[in-house]
Image (spheres, grey):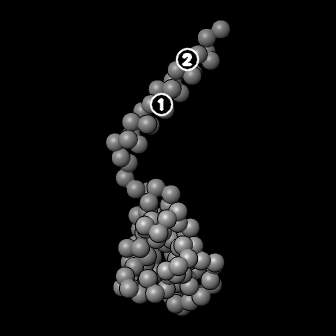
Amino acid sequence: MDLSISTDPQGLLPLEAVQKILNRSRASVYRYANTELDVLNPAYDPRKLNPEHRGGKDDPLLFHPNEVARFARDILGIKPVTIAIQQAPQTETQELLQAILSELQSIHQLLRSRP
């Protein structure tokens, strides 16, 4: 199975992307996920799909691509599993920060070249 999936800025997969990768319903992915109502971040369970640690109960479930591939391969028996990560398109903020960085690098070069 080869899929190209968009991730969040940290490279983690949201629930919708995991649905697409595993070709399962949202309810199925929730059943696979290692979550509990009374425990925010339960201990690692090799038989479940383990999300990344969350700071609060309202934070969305996010999954590391390697964890999704491991679960698909080892538990669901989907072989071979390849997940290609695509960078999210640059936002205006990212473009502006890149322009500022370029300008600062130019200033730094100019200052270094002065005696």
Disc with the residue nearer the chain's start (2 vs 1): 1
Residue 17 tag number: none
Residue 110 tag number: 2
Q: Is residue 80 above or below residue 63?
A: below
Mark 1 lies on residue: 102
- How far is disc 2 from disc 1 in space, using C-alphas? 12 Å
Q: Is residue 24 left or right of residue 33?
A: left
Name the residue nearer the viewer: 115 or 68.
68
Residue visible at 56% across and 89% down? 75
Give the image quarter of residue 26: bottom left
Where residue 13 sits in the image (x, y, percent)? 46, 68
Q: Secondary structure at mark 2?
A: helix
**In the orientation shown, which residue stands out farthest toward the front?**
38
Q: Secondary structure at mark 1?
A: helix
Q: Is residue 55 above or below residue 63?
A: above
For the question of whether residue 111 can be seen, the reply is yes
Give the image quarter of residue 45: bottom right
Residue visible at 52% across and 20% down? 107
Query: Contact, CB < 8 Å: mark 2 with mark 1?
Result: no
Residue visible at 59% across and 77% down? 42
Where residue 14 sits in the image (x, y, percent)? 42, 69
Amino acid tagged 1: Ser
Amino acid tagged 2: Leu
Quadrant of the image for the C terminus? top right
Where residue 49 sits in the image (x, y, percent)? 54, 81
For the question of whether residue 64 can be seen, the reply is no
Residue visible at 49% across and 65% down? 56
